[in-house]
Amino acid sequence: MRPAPRPLVLAAGGTGLVLDIAGPSLPRVLHWGAALDPAADEDAAFAASGAGTAGDARTAGSGVTYGVPLVPLQAERWSGRPGIRGDRAGRWPHRRPLPTEPVTHAADDSGGSVVTAHAADAEAGVTLTCELRLTAQGVVGLRHTVANTGDDHWTMAAARPSLPLPEEAAELLDFTGRWGFERAPQRSPFIHGLHLRETREGRPGHDSATLLVAGTAGFGFRHGQVWAVHVAWSGESEYGAERSAGHGSVLSGGELLASGEVRLAPGESYASPWVYFVHSGDGLDGIGDRLHRMLRARAVDDGWTVRRTDYEFLTSPQARDVLHEEGITVIDYRSIQHVWTLPRTQSPAP
């Protein structure tokens, strides 16, 4: 009999992921946090990951697995919020997508990894594609795409990528605010239940969570373990941190869809925004370091793909030429425009 695939151990930029790809369902996340040694024996990596300490704990040998599903659903014995929601005029609200082909894993040119999983629920008439990218800087990107293979419309209600958290994540941090006082931090204990932040202004707004961070007790800028999520989306969005004695803890994010906003005709598909997950063993500064290094790498490798609010890119030597080539005008960024008037060999004061 063909042996089951071993856990997939990924590592880049100091971040590690361990995925159970043995099936029969979509991959399960056994570990997200500090990097494990991908060259080590998979059994040792599995044990080092702490698999089974969080999430759905079912025992080996009794048809049971460990970890949190990459797409949490009731069919996976998940009792929390589902990773995808939708229905066909009230029918098939509870899906059970099964893999249609083996999980693929490849290294990218920058030193990261790309994992793709395909599944389908033939009775419900939907397919699901999960894309996971671990960048060279240690940032995990997740995106779910749902396609309608049925004969009538499928209504999307939610697609929220998520990753598990360990028990030692004891505090939450996010941001709120108003005009003239945005990005005000607020902390709270991470207790059982759902901590949910939603923006309903058609854009992130002054009170956007921006980042939802879970961390060890008393974490700060340069100490403590922290796990964060950011939704790379300029419209309405949601951020969630959920904890339960039955299924453990997860961080999640996604686009906030209004009722009936996305109705897929036969053959159409919906892709969630990219949701980025970042771990640091050195406090909040480690989160910022990984995100900024990822953005700088994208600015160099891909041209104009960085948001206009990334100050470091806008003040970089190539920004003026890139924006001009793309026909983009920056309005009322006076300090940035001042930088652009400096000689090319002169840098702005730190």
Image: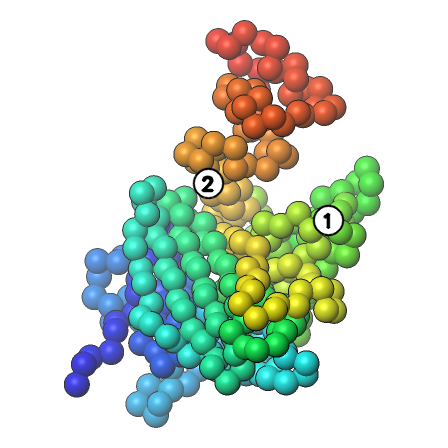
**In the rendered image, the vertical position of residue 64 relative to residue 80, given as above or below:** below
**In the rendered image, the vertical position of residue 337 relative to residue 21, given as above or below:** above
Residue occupied by mark 1:
203
Examine the rendering and report whether any part of residue 56 can be seen: no
Task: Tell me the element at label 2.
Answer: helix
**Amino acid type indicated by mark 1:** Arg
Local packing at callout 2 (Cα closer than 10 Å; few below 14, some 14-19, many 20+) is some
Real-space Cα separation, disc 1 to disc 2, in angstroms: 23 Å
Local packing at callout 1 (Cα closer than 10 Å; few below 14, some 14-19, many 20+) is few
- Decide which of 16, 215 is in the foreground and name it: 16
Badge number at residue 294: 2
Residue 241 pos. (x, y %):
61, 65
> Measuring 74% from the left and 69% from the top, which residue is drawn there?
259
Earlier sequence position, callout 1 versus callout 2: 1
Residue 75 pos. (x, y %):
51, 84
- Decide which of 268, 81 is in the foreground and name it: 268
> Measuring 63% from the left and 34% from the top, which residue is drawn there?
309
Residue 89 pos. (x, y %):
68, 81
- Decide which of 321, 267 is in the foreground and name it: 267
Badge number at residue 333: none
> Measuring 38% from the left and 87% from the top, which residue is drawn there?
64
Task: Tell me the element at label 1.
Answer: loop
- Decide which of 135, 156 is in the foreground and name it: 156
> Measuring 68% from the left and 83% from the top, which residue is drawn there?
90
State the residue lying farthest toward the bottom: 62
**Amino acid type indicated by mark 2:** Met
Examine the rendering and report whether any part of residue 143 can be seen: yes
